[in-house]
Image: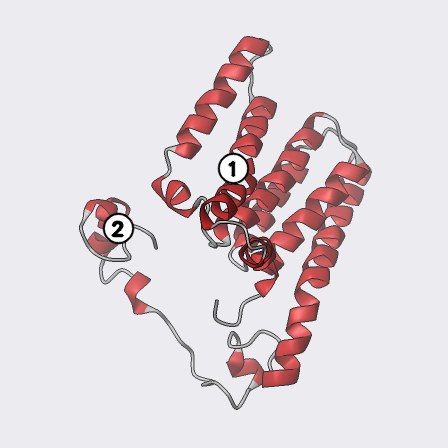
Amino acid sequence: QSYFNPYVYVPFYLLARSGLPALLATSILAIIQSGVLWLTYEIAVVVAASDSPERRIALGVCAVALAFANPILIAELGSSYSDVITAELVLAGWLLLARAVGSPGTASIVCAGLLLGAASALKPTNSVHALSAFVLLLFLPATRRAGMRYAALCVLAFCVGLLLVAAPWAIRLQQHFGNPLFPLLNGVFHSPHYSTAATLDYRFIPDSLADALWRPFAIVAPVGIVDNE
């Protein structure tokens, strides 16, 4: 879609080109995307305050039920939307960091950084959840020196994951349009193929304080796009 990183659509592309019946291809994609529910369960079990296995399992089951009650998730399962697949990378990174809080390890922290970086490269808005995950590093049971080392490794791994996944497509955009982030930040790169003026989608900016307070409840209004965006 647009000029964003297309590599996240590889699973959908391979299934579409496989010659499989549409229903079977969609079902396989939905199974892949359903991993987001398993990751939700694992995170819930890790962060559960109770030592009782039964209560931890119950909390995990409830977390999955709440996640699956999300109508946007249900609507996107089996579709080519990139949200669910990239969310799996984000949740996997969060899970590794959550486990590291209980038992710090270089491997888990580095892998978490790589996953969060890759997720941000595939879908830029994932960077919000990736960067906020770094707060977990403050809770690692380690000395200040070890904590700083873990934080540095996680940030470095994040940058490596981001560059490895983003660089190939950014190079192609640079070659074609003169802007490695085309069409974003064109006021900086000045590609002749797009306006250098700032662009805003005013549809998502509240007109007033009352509109901003109403926005969380606007999903019930029968207005197109509102329920999704």
In screen coordinates, is 122 left or right of 223? right
Q: x%, y% of residue 208?
A: 22, 59
Q: Which residue is mark 1?
A: 34
- Give the amino acid at mark 2: Arg
- Label 1's element? loop
Residue appearing at x 37%, y 33% in the figure: 69
Residue appearing at x 52%, y 91% in the figure: 192
Return the residue nearer the eye: 3 or 151. 3
Q: Nearer the viewer, mark 1 or mark 2?
A: 1
Picture quarter with the C terminus: bottom left
Q: Height in image: 57 above or below 200?
A: above
Numbered label attached to residue 18: none
Residue appearing at x 51%, y 33% in the figure: 37
- Label 2's element? helix
Whichever of callouts 1 and 2 sits on the residue coming sooner in the sequence is 1
Q: x%, y% of residue 148?
A: 77, 43
**C-alpha span from label 1 to label 2:** 29 Å
- Give the amino acid at mark 1: Ser
- Say which quarter of the image contains residue 8: bottom right
Is residue 65 visible in the rendered image? The answer is: yes
Is residue 178 visible in the rendered image? The answer is: no
Q: Height in image: 43 above or below 171?
A: above
Q: Which residue is mark 2?
A: 215
